Image (cartoon, grey):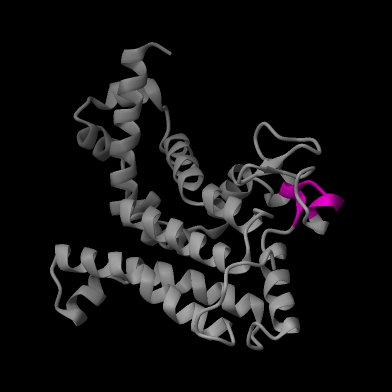
Amino acid sequence: MQKKDLQSEQLILKAARRVFQRSGYGGARMQEIADEAHISKASLHYYYRSKDKLFHTVFREDIRLFLIPLIGILRDPSLSLESRIRTFVGSYMNTLLENPGLPLFIMQELSSNPQRLISLVEETVPGVEGRPVDGYTGSDASVGGVSNRESSDSTSKEANVDEIPLLAAFIRQIEDGMASGRCHKVDPEQFILSMISMCVFPFIGRPLIKVLLKKDEQQYRDFLVRREEEILLYLLRILYTNDKPKDNSRH
């Protein structure tokens, strides 16, 4: 693809992303996307002949941006439990701050057509429905710069990293922490869901929360920037039996 065509396509994708996040798949119109990109509808159809194809392209890009780095963090065998929590929360919050409209857009699509969204995730995300990480299919597959062969993780010795259930390493670390007495007795799945919810809800509920807290746009962004440390403070207190867990274990 020529440079001019590539620049035009990127312009269209950025415009389409804004329209889809504003209007959802059902409410978006090709004419609206063309207007947003400041091009004719005929020019838009030259690159994308249907709204469905355009939506698939935009959503795949968003999923790659949003989920794939987090999947690497969840599966990385080199991370200790506390490091995994800190890295996940930090990466998640930074991604959401840069793309604040994405969580609500995903929730809207899950509500209106969950199967379409689930199918797109299965097509796009490594390790979902057995789809391997792009470029890695053998025993040398790596996540987070650590190959299976290099990893001391017993599970990754038995299967490719991208074949391991997404939360398996995380859950096992929490269970090991509880067995050793380092962690309180918690339900690992509930803990992980709470961690994700604490990150994403302030973005989904943004309009209402701004009103309740009486904050303008800049004040609310500052509030979200501070949110990361608040989340970590709560999570580590809930999980660990001491207030300042030492991050010197691979468990």
The reply, left or right, for residue 58 in relation to residue 23 is: right
Q: Kindly give the residue lying farthest to the right in the view shown.
A: 158
Q: Residue 99 appears at what percent x and percent y? A: 34, 52
Q: Which quarter of the figure has residue 214?
A: bottom left
Q: Judge by depth and name the residue closer to the eye, 249 or 43.
A: 249
* Relative to 157, residue 204 above or below: below
Mostly what secondary structure, the magenta segment? Answer: helix
Q: Residue 183 appears at what percent x and percent y? A: 64, 83
Q: Which residues are magenta?
A: 156-164
Q: Judge by depth and name the residue closer to the eye, 60 or 94.
A: 94
- Does 163 appear in magenta? yes
Q: Which quarter of the figure has residue 101?
A: bottom left
Q: Judge by depth and name the residue closer to the eye, 142 or 191.
A: 142
* Quadrant of the snapshot with the N terminus: top left
Q: Judge by depth and name the residue closer to the eye, 120 or 64.
A: 64
* Quadrant of the snapshot with the C terminus: bottom right
* Relative to 202, residue 113 above or below: above
Q: Residue at point 24% right, 40% down?
A: 32
Q: Residue at point 78% right, 46% down?
A: 160
The reply, left or right, for residue 75 in relation to residue 106 is: right
Q: How many marks?
A: 0
The reply, left or right, for residue 158 in relation to residue 244 is: right
Q: Residue at point 32% right, 56% down?
A: 97
The reply, left or right, for residue 171 in relation to residue 90 is: right
Q: Residue 224 appears at what percent x and percent y? A: 29, 67
Q: Residue 244 appears at what percent x and percent y? A: 50, 80
- Does 216 appear in magenta? no
Q: Residue at point 69% right, 55% down?
A: 77
